[in-house]
Image: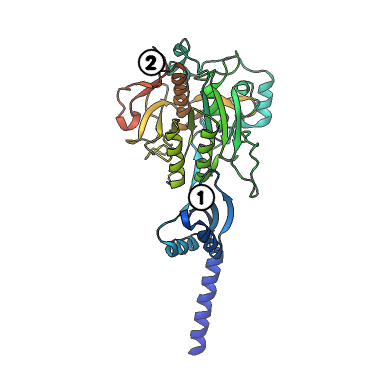
Amino acid sequence: MNFFRFGSISLLLLLAVSTAQAEELKRFVLRGGLQTERLHQRARHFRARDLHHLENTDADVVEMTASDAKALRKEFGRGFSIEEDAKVEALGRPHGQAWWNNPFLDEARARQQAISQPAEVLPWGIAAVQAPEAWQYSRGAGIKVCVVDTGIQKDHPDLAANIAGGRNFVRMGGSVDKTKWNDDNGHGTHVSGTIAAIDNSIGVVGVAPLAKIYAVKVLDRNGSGYLSDVAAGIRECVIAGAHVISMSLGSSGDSSVLHDAVIYAKNAGKVIVAAAGNESGPVLYPAKYSEVWAISAVDKNLKFASFSNFGPEVDFAAPGVTVYSTVKGSGYAYFSGTSMATPHVAGIVALALSAQTNHVVSQTINGLSTDQQGYGFANAYLSVKP
């Protein structure tokens, strides 16, 4: 009997060890305040693996198991925080295609298209927000829009002259090269075209064709990243002197580090615009914060997009279905998502700031609730008209 009891205990111990070893490592953000050094020492005791210090903050990003994070949290109690570094995703995709499985984003085909650039067309969304009517008063000159996304194609012929540089926060192999902000996904380039594609007789034209765009790469080639990097990216936008921060990304997870960065940017006088989300549900973060303008999506007929999130946090609606804009490889493609609605509003803000009207005017869409459209459909012309 004792033999079998001993054997059972041994088996349970082996299973416990095996489970602990198999537990997944996750990213956490540590903030220790006055206890920072002690927190770091104890975190290492709990097998935390240092990743990096979060720039311009009092926070550090580490990898550890959820069990170890729970034990560390229990030991310290108040006076510090440890929160999971939630994933964040790009909120737009090629229209009618599976996620990123789009021939428009194939480099060879796009480069072939770039040999002979198509004649400039006016995308329906640019016309719908009455940007051409607004250009007699403002084209966005003197305004910098920070695009927090997958980067921007540096040499896209419809964007290059308006790109004011960039910064990369995506780490590869534990290190980061801040100069590698070129877009390896396509999403950030598409967003940027809607904001500020040049009025140059080729491709498309953006809402604010004389505005400058600054690339902050926080999402990888799959359109995925972490809230801590978004937080660092927001602070970079402020440091870079941007007037508007455009974020076509979102997460269901909240983050004190992210919210602090948003508050920092808001207090610095920046206008922050973000996508509501594409799950037909509640508004995602960072759009959910009161300091951020949350943007929902409508189609050509100003019908609410079936995928668009909604809620009391929504501030404006904008074009987000079958939006034509620039993509990597010097090409052009149709994307849909609240990601596509957001840059329309960011561009309108650029026009308003350049015209010194400093407000965005909208029109109510009949048949849409306040939770779906907020103040209404953003209008560039009314926003800049004296």
Q: Which circle marks residue 87 in the picture?
A: none
Image quarter hosting the C terminus: top left
Q: Which circle marks residue 59 in the picture?
A: 1
Q: Nearer the viewer, residue 10 or 377?
A: 377
The reply to whether residue 373 is in sight is yes
- Residue 149: quadrant of the picture: top right
Q: Identify residue type, mark 2.
A: Leu
Task: Report whether 189 appears left or right of 340.
Answer: right
Q: Position of residue 110 (x, y in %)?
A: 65, 27
Q: Which residue appears at 66% of the width and 28% of the height?
A: 109
- What whole-number distance in Å separates the C-alpha atoms at marks 1 and 2? 43 Å
Q: Which residue appears at 55% of the width and 44% of the height?
A: 55
Say whether disc 1 or disc 2 marks the residue closer to the N-terminus: 1
Residue lying furthest bottom in this view?
Answer: 1
For numbered disc 1, what is the local secondary structure? Answer: strand
Q: Nearer the viewer, residue 163 or 241?
A: 241
Task: Report whether 143 appears left or right of 175.
Answer: left
Residue annotated with mark 2: 382
Q: Nearer the viewer, residue 5 or 290?
A: 290
Q: Which residue appears at 54% of the width and 34% of the height?
A: 239
Q: Identify residue type, mark 1.
A: Ala
Please tell me whether residue 129 is drawn above or below residue 169 in the rendered image.
Answer: above
Residue lying furthest top in this view?
Answer: 136
